[in-house]
Amino acid sequence: MEHIYIIGAFLEQNGFEVIQKNESENFGNYIAVYSNGSIFFRILLDKSQLSIEIKSYQSFEWFDVSLVLCMVDNKSVSIKSLGAKEIFDFLKNKLREVIFLFNNINYPATEKKLKDLERIRSKKMFPDA
């Protein structure tokens, strides 16, 4: 669980503040939401499964950080989940670019591209659907 604290500390060092935090001692589940006023990061740990999602203040829709990585790095969509180290390295190297993509001006195009990537990933996960 140390990895979620490292990612959270990194976000705080880069101008984000915790706006929600919940940790279950019995099951090891964890949720924290960080915001800088225009972009939100949600870190979830549920049954040892790590998930990090991003959304704009303009939207109610959260996007998996792995889709954002595919978009930023122009990689093909994978159904494989990213590990904590991959997520941290991505945020460490590309946080400013992510913030730029989720800003007021760029968000509509970002949202469209991420929804396209979601459709591609869904087709890879469920090819017969």
Image (cartoon, grey):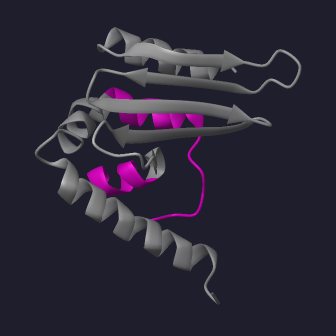
Residue 1 visible (yes or no): yes
Residue 11 image offset from top left, x and y in percent: 39, 18
Name the side, left or right, on which 29 lies relative to 33: right
Residue at 34 percent across and 46 percent down: it is 59
Residue 70 image offset from top left, x and y in percent: 37, 56
Residue 88 image offset from top left, x and y in percent: 46, 29
Residue at 31 percent across and 32 percent down: it is 39
Most distant residue in the left direction: 105
Quadrant for the N terminus, please.
top right
| Above or below for 12 versus 55 | above
Residue 76 visible (yes or no): no
Name the side, left or right, on which 52 lies relative to 67: right
| Above or below for 37 versus 94 | above
Question: Based on the displayed image, in which of its 4 quarters is residue 74 positioned?
Answer: bottom left
Q: How many marks?
A: 0
| Above or below for 61 versus 14 | below
> Magenta region's main secondary structure?
helix
| Above or below for 116 versus 24 | below
**Range covered by the magenta-colored residues:** 67-92
Asked whether residue 62 is drawn in magenta, I would say no
Residue 37 image offset from top left, x and y in percent: 27, 23
Residue at 56 percent across and 46 percent down: it is 82
Residue at 30 percent across and 20 percent down: it is 36
